[in-house]
Image (tube, rainbow, N blue to C red):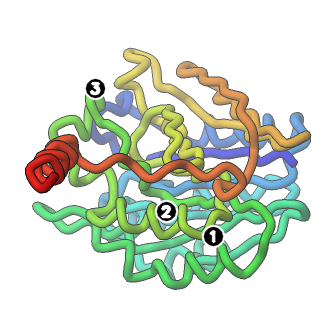
Amino acid sequence: MKIAIITDIHHGPQSHTKKDGWNGLGTVENFVQHAHAAGADLILDLGDHISDSNHETDVKAATEVATTLATFKGPRYHVLGNHDVNNLSIADNEAIFGQSMQSQVIDLGEIRLVVWQPGVKITAGVGFPRAADELDWLVAALNADDRPAIIATHVPLSGHSQIGNYYFQRNPQYSTYPDHDSVREAVEATGKAALWLSGHVHWNTLTNVGGVQHLTIQSASERFTTYPLAAEAFAMLTIEDGQFTIDVQGNDPFHARLPFRKSGERPWMSPLRPFNEIAERADVEHEGA
């Protein structure tokens, strides 16, 4: 199984660290060509197709991205990012990309791809809404089948450190959901998830939490890790013989190969209580002896 992945294209007006005059379509075209050449079974787009401006401009930019991605001769699945919904509705995006932007489960034979679409609308000064509002659907989807699942979201839920991140070191509340810990624990409790794929944070990371491998893929447009060049990143995820390989192409390359298995196949021990609680309990037991 080969899944070609692209995220955070940010096609449209200049913003933040993007290169002056950035046009994401060339990178998207290269991505589609690479996916064809590598024999990808499907493409997965993890959101933030555009740099939002206004409704008219956003429709034009998103349509250009959708048209280019549609040149892939195979299935494609899209996740909504926060920039995709600032001026466009979910219905607008569905019309532009020609498919549902609701959560769904894709049957990939021996594995499943769970495209989970919790809210991605950011409130200034607050951040993302609670993801737990959509958690019942995700847990039910994971428990409905015993095959290992790959979860795909725009926003990561690993809770990994943002130290060094241009956007989020000083703004960590915008890097994930406020209830990421409880969502993650509920997913881990199912024992069914193997990988969790996300974008949003504009860098490559791999974080193992509770036996679930959380991967974030670098943005196509970003350059804070590759200045003055744009990262022009996209990735190929290959799953075979009980292992997965992730290869990120472009100016910020990344490679990893690890076992592909459900988290429940090798459960982690529950984290130790705070040391001070252990010490206090030991003191009480000692005094009572």
The dot on residue 97 is: 1
**In the depicted structure, whether residue 108 falls above or below residue 89:** above
Q: Is residue 32 visible?
A: yes
Q: Nearer the viewer, residue 121 or 87?
A: 121
Q: Nearer the viewer, residue 262 or 10?
A: 262
Query: Which of the 4 quarters of the picture holds residue 245?
Result: top right
Q: CA distance from mark 3 to mark 2?
A: 34 Å
Q: Amino acid at mark 2?
A: Lys
Q: Position of residue 98 (x, y in %)?
A: 67, 75
The dot on residue 136 is: none
Q: Which residue was labeled with disc 3?
A: 164
Q: CA distance from mark 2 to mark 1?
A: 12 Å
Q: How many numbered circles does the render carry?
A: 3
Element class at badge 1: helix
Residue furthest toward the front?
Answer: 289
Q: Residues within 10 Å of mark 3 (few under 14, many from 20)?
A: few
Q: Residues within 10 Å of mark 2 (few under 14, many from 20)?
A: some
Q: Position of residue 50 (x, y in %)?
A: 44, 54
Q: Which residue was labeled with disc 2?
A: 60
